[in-house]
Image (tube, rainbow, N blue to C red):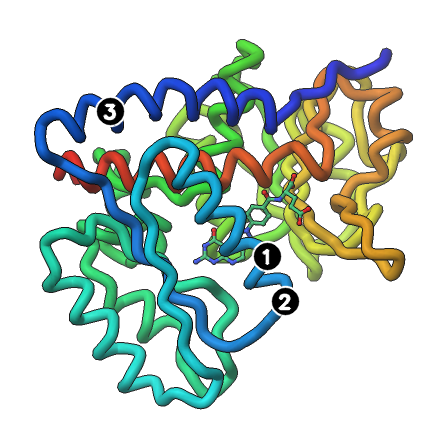
C-alpha cells in the first residue's frame, strides 16, 4: 500500500479562507479579533514560530500584537503583563510562547491567563472542560489533528489509537480528544516496554515524541493512519518529523508529512480559537 499524504498546509489554507470571511463579518459588527503574543527571550526557534503566528493572523484579518520581553525579567513581572492583558477588553486571546526561561515556572504563567482568553487551551479550567466534553478552547495541535482526520473522512469511533508521547500540550490532550470521539486509546511513552507490540495493533498512530525517525516501518500495521507531530531540526537545518516518512508511507493508508503537516494546522486552530474568543463563546 502507498499512503495518501494529508497536506496540512492545503487544509490550513482552506480553513483560513473561511475564517477570513468570518472575521470580515465580525469587523462589520464592530468586533476586531485581537491576539496578544508574548515572547520571552531570544530563542531563534521560538522567534520563527511566533513570526508564523503573526503572518497567519494577518492573513485572516486578526490583529496580532507581539510583546517581546527580555530573558532576565522576573516571573512576577510577566504575571503583571498577563494581568494587564486579562483586563484589557480589546484583547481577546493571549498566548505566551513556550518554553520559558528556567527561572520562570510555566504552570504559574499558564494559570495566570484568564481562561476565556486562553486560546492555547492550556489552562486547567479549559483542560478540565475538554476532559468532560464541554464547549471550550481545544488545544491547537490536538484540535488540528482531529480536523485532519475529519478532512479525509477517517472514522475514529471504535478505532485503536496509539499515542506515542505524553506531553501536556500534545500527547495527553490528543488522546483525550480522540477518546471523546469514541476511540480506544493507548498511551505509550519512554518507559513503555515493547512499544512495537502496541503500535503494530494501532489503526491510528499519533507520533509525538520529539525524536527524528523514531517510528519506522516495523511499527506500522498495514493500512494504518500515521500522524506525525514531531518537529525535529536536523544539523543541515532541515525539518523532519518523528516518523521515517518514506518507510511508513509504504504501509500506511494515510500519513502526514513534516513540514506541511500538523504544524500549519496548529496555527490555524489558534486563529480559530482567537475568533471564538472574540465572539465570547467560551
Ligand atoms: N504557547 C505555545 N503555543 C504553541 O502552539 C507553541 C508553543 N507555545 N511553543 C512551540 C510550539 C511549536 N509550535 C509550532 C507551530 C507551527 C509550526 C509550523 O507551522 N511548522 C511548519 C514549518 C515551519 C518551519 O519551517 O520552521 C510546518 O510544519 O510546515 C511549528 C511549530 C507551536 N507551539
Query: Could you tell me if the residues under marks 1 and 2 are in contact, i.e. CB atoms within 8 Å?
Result: yes
- The mark found on residue 89 in the picture is none
Quarter of image, res 275: top left
Quarter of image, res 279: top left
Which residue is at a point 68% across and 23% down the rendered structure image?
225
Which element carries disc 1, helix, strand or loop? helix
Q: Which residue is mark 1?
A: 48
Tell which circle, 3 or 1, labels the residue nearer the N-terminal end: 3
Q: Viewer-proximal residue, 62 or 222?
A: 62
x and y, in percent, of residue 45 in the image: 63, 62
Q: Which residue is mark 2?
A: 44
Q: In the visual, does 118 lie left or right of 59?
A: left
Q: Which residue is mark 3?
A: 24
Label 3 to label 1, Cα distance in Å?
Answer: 27 Å
Which residue is at a point 21% across and 79% down the rendered structure image?
80
Which element carries disc 3, helix, strand or loop? helix
x and y, in percent, of residue 74 in the image: 36, 89
Does residue 256 sit above or below 32 in this rendering? above
Q: In the visual, does 84 lie left or right of 140?
A: left
Question: Which quarter of the figure is the C terminus placed in?
Answer: top left
Quarter of image, res 148: top right
- Residue 128 in sight from this viewpoint: no
Which residue is at a point 80% across and 42% down the rendered structure image?
215
- Residue 143 in sight from this viewpoint: yes
Which residue is at a point 64% across and 27% down the rendered structure image?
204
Amino acid at each position: 500500500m502507498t499512503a495518501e499524504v494529508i497536506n496540512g498546509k492545503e487544509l490550513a489554507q482552506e480553513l483560513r479562507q473561511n475564517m477570513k470571511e468570518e472575521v470580515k463579518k465580525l469587523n462589520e459588527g464592530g468586533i476586531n479579533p485581537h491576539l496578544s503574543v508574548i515572547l520571552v527571550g531570544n530563542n531563534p526557534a521560538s522567534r520563527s514560530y511566533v513570526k508564523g503566528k503573526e503572518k497567519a493572523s494577518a492573513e485572516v484579518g486578526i490583529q496580532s500584537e507581539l510583546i517581546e520581553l527580555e530573558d532576565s525579567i522576573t516571573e512576577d513581572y510577566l504575571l503583571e503583563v498577563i494581568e494587564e492583558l486579562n483586563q484589557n477588553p480589546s484583547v481577546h486571546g493571549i498566548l505566551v510562547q513556550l518554553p520559558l526561561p528556567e527561572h520562570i515556572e510555566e504552570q504559574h504563567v499558564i494559570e495566570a491567563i484568564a481562561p476565556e482568553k486562553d486560546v492555547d487551551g492550556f489552562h486547567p479550567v479549559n483542560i478540565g472542560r475538554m476532559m468532560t466534553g464541554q464547549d471550550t478552547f481545544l488545544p491547537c495541535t490536538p484540535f488540528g489533528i482531529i480536523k485532519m482526520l475529519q478532512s479525509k473522512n477517517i472514522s475514529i469511533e471504535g478505532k485503536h489509537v496509539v499515542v506515542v508521547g505524553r506531553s501536556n500540550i500534545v500527547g495527553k490532550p490528543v488522546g483525550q480528544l480522540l477518546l471523546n470521539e469514541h476511540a480506544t486509546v493507548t498511551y505509550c511513552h519512554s518507559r513503555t516496554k515493547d512499544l512495537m507490540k502496541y503500535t503494530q495493533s494501532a489503526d491510528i498512530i499519533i507520533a509525538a515524541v520529539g525524536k527524528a525517525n523514531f517510528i519506522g516501518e516495523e511499527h506500522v500495521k498495514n493500512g494504518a493512519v500515521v500522524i506525525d507531530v514531531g518537529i525535529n531540526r536536523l544539523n543541515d537545518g532541515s525539518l523532519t518529523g518523528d516518523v521515517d516518512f518514506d518507510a511508513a508511507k509504504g504501509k500506511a493508508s494515510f500519513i502526514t508529512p513534516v513540514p506541511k503537516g500538523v504544524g500549519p494546522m496548529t496555527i490555524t486552530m489558534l486563529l480559530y480559537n482567537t475568533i471564538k474568543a472574540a465572539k465570547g463563546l467560551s
